[in-house]
Amino acid sequence: MKNQKGFSLVELLVVVIIIAIVAAIAIPNLLSSRKAANESSAIGSLRTIHGAQATWYATSGGNTTYAASLADLGTAGLLDPVLGGATQPAIKSGYSIAGSAAAASGTTPASFCAAATPQSTGATGTGERTFGVGTNGVLYGGLPAAAPTCGTGGSLTPGSATVIQ
């Protein structure tokens, strides 16, 4: 009988089982890393929107108003085409990002807010927390039960969300 070389069926099954175990460990970590990256992107987008609104207020708003929409900021060249494009709310990195503003009226100063909400939550979702920023530049974040909300009058209601440093 010739000397046969190769792997036996048992050896191949052991290798397949080892690969399956490594995949079972790695995939949940990969999903949680993707969520963390999406949440960081949402926070960065809100910081960008705050800076764009501050620039609008100082240069275009005559110190009495903020841009009424993210599309206005995009038209002025203050936001990238994803955030300031024609499609609103903007969809970026698995988050829906929308904003509103209110002009100064009497003794009420002008204000704005923007919020980022995950498109889906759960084990395979795009994020878990909702984020918001207001005129004062303070970023808030919280789970859906404690999420900050952006009102139509440009006011941010932080609810029981926590401040993000």
Image (cartoon, rainbow, N blue to C red):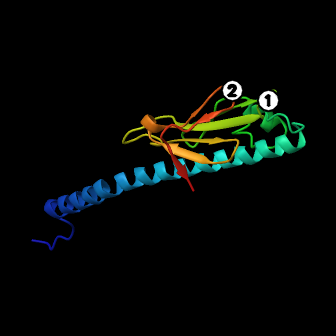
Q: Which mark is residue 153?
A: 2
Picture quadrant of residue 155: top right
| Residue 103 as seen in the image, left or right of residue 141 | right
Dot 2 surroundings within 10 Å: few (below 14), some, or many (20 or more)? some
Residue at 28% over, 54% down: 24
Quadrant for the N terminus, please: bottom left
Identify the element where label 2 is drawn.
loop
The residue lying furthest to the front in this view is 107
Question: Of the residues shown, which amino acid type is indicated by label 2?
Answer: Gly
Residue at 77% over, 34% down: 110
Q: Residue 23: x and y, percent?
A: 31, 56
Residue at 18% over, 58% down: 13
How many numbered marks appear?
A: 2
| Residue 14 as seen in the image, left or right of residue 88 | left
Picture quadrant of residue 29: bottom left
Picture quadrant of residue 15: bottom left
Residue at 45% over, 54% down: 33
Viewer-proximal residue, 34 or 121? 121
Viewer-proximal residue, 24 or 70? 70
Viewer-proximal residue, 103 or 82? 103
Question: Of the residues shown, which amino acid type is indicated by label 1?
Answer: Ala
- Residue corresponding to mark 1: 103
Q: Residue 39: x and y, percent?
A: 53, 48
Identify the element where label 1 is drawn.
loop
Between discs 1 and 2, the one toward the N terminus: 1
Viewer-proximal residue, 103 or 31? 103
Q: Can residue 85 be seen in this view?
A: no
The residue lying furthest to the left in this view is 1
Distance CA(mark 1)–CA(mark 2): 9 Å
| Residue 137 as seen in the image, left or right of residue 22 | right
